[in-house]
Amino acid sequence: MSKTGFLEHPRQLPARQPVAERLRHWGEFVEKYQPAELNRQAARCMDCGVPFCHNGCPLGNVIPEFNDAVYRGEWQEAYEILVSTNNFPEFTGRVCPAPCESACVLGIHQPAVAIEEIEKHIIEMAFERGFVKPQTIFHRTGKKVAVVGSGPAGLAAAAQLNLAGHEVTVFERDAKPGGLLRYGIPDFKLEKSVVERRIDFLKKEGIIFKCNAEVGRNVSVKELLHGFDAIVLAGGSTVPRDLKVPGRDLEGVVFAMDFLKKQNERVNDLHFQILDFKNGSVEISQNGIGKAAKNIQISQFPNISNVIVIGGGDTGSDCVGTSNRLGAASVTQFELLPKPPAERSENMPWPTFPMLYKTTSSHEEGCERRFAITTKAFLGDEKGKLRALLVADLDWKVSTDGRPSGFEEIPNSEREIPCDLALLAMGFVHPQHDGMLKQLEIELDERGNVRASDQNFSTNHPKIFTAGDMRRGQSLVVWAIHEGRECAKKVHDFLEIEH
């Protein structure tokens, strides 16, 4: 590893396609590093005596070591180091907010090492060179495990339990496996061919996937309880936070995940013509041939004119990028909280993950952002369709630690903003209770999540475990993978001890 690379080379991220070009397709638009630039970026890692990036990463990725292997051009070594802690670096290398970079020691005085991009390059190089191969399971224990949910937590748990020799069946209520990875994240951030590639490998390793299979509806809970030695609940946090103000039932007020899911289905199934969100329609035409999302072109129509995204997180940002690709005349994003600072403050010291003002690629494509604003009502026309939002500005109070601690509405700030599609992207409150959880009589915690400890991931039922957002609440893909891996350990211990 270069001892002075961090002094010689500035942080440099790969180039992106110009906005006008990438708005014409649904595919990924971040280019790859050239070999020389990748070498320079890996050289910036200082190989710290105490690498805080390990602690910043929920998975505990061995970051300095794989950076060094990349610097030396030892790609198989880099790959083996990376997958020793992370089942799916092709996902985290694309959609993770990189808490490891926030904890990078170099980040105290300089921009952090580009860890996330290096991680993505390692796994893509590994696929290109054939390092990624389905593992042969030589010994089967005879124990059967059901995993409910095929998002990142469920896939990680299934992968680990399968490698331990157990027979794993994954139940997914949607048409294809992947959960949030497939249906919640747009292709311009994570092309679904990347998800399909990993699912194919998991199938070749022996994992069984049963789709259109909703436990508690068309799959009975008795089938799971009687047919499997252990069950992992990894269904995610799927009940969205609502905004119950006057006019909520107007046509054109839509949950963000419903919007994103419908669009992801249309982009990838390639058998659609009209995208209808109750308020007009947007025509999507397919030009070219093949399955690649990049072959899908967009015909812009004025039916979706003024889009307002309510919620300032990553899901809201994804709605912004999707709306821009659908040809919206204007896209505005609301955030209830005040605008975050551009740099760390005293209450966000290194190496904690700071809540800073972040401009995503979707924001670059066109978006007006408004902070400290509240929506008081949705206003409709004579046909019951959304025409505007009634909003007001807020004056936030700040506590002694610098955090927002309450607000008051600013007098005379109430006004109407034209809008014909409002997307509610305010997060999720808890998993779905009706159906599976009620039928299994699973205990819930005070937040409505499945109750289970950090130590053993077990529920009140002796052979039922849980992991991911269903247990910890809405979180990151990297945390979901960590949860799935740790839960798999406890399930394996249970099967070894009990049976």
Image (cartoon, rainbow, N blue to C red):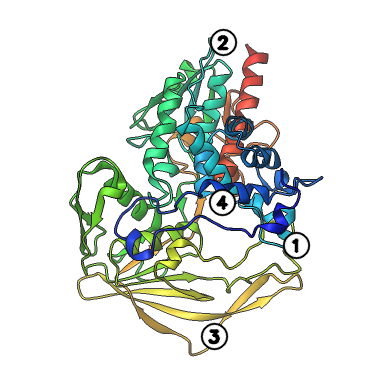
User: Does the residue at mark 2 contact the one at mark 4 (Cβ under 8 Å)?
Assistant: no
Note whether residue 458 is visible: no
Amino acid type, residue under disc 2 in the picture: Thr
Amino acid type, residue under disc 4 in the picture: Glu
Camera-side mark, 4 or 3? 4
Q: Residue at x 33, y 61 (%)?
A: 21
Element at badge 3? Answer: loop
Element at badge 1? Answer: loop
Circle 4 residues within 10 Å: few <14, some 14–19, many ≥20: some
Name which of mark 1 and mark 4 comes first in the sequence: 4
- Quarter holding the N terminus is top right
Q: Is residue 479 left or right of residue 144?
A: right
Mark 2 lies on residue: 141
Picture quadrant where residue 80 is located:
top right
Residue 487 in the image: above or below residue 64: above
Mark 4 lies on residue: 37
User: Does the residue at mark 1 contact the one at mark 4 (Cβ under 8 Å)?
Assistant: no
Measured Cα–Cα span from mark 1 to mark 2: 48 Å
Q: Nearer the viewer, residue 297 or 316?
A: 297
Amino acid type, residue under disc 3 in the picture: Ile
Mark 1 lies on residue: 349
Camera-side mark, 2 or 3? 2
Q: Nearer the viewer, residue 75 or 425?
A: 75
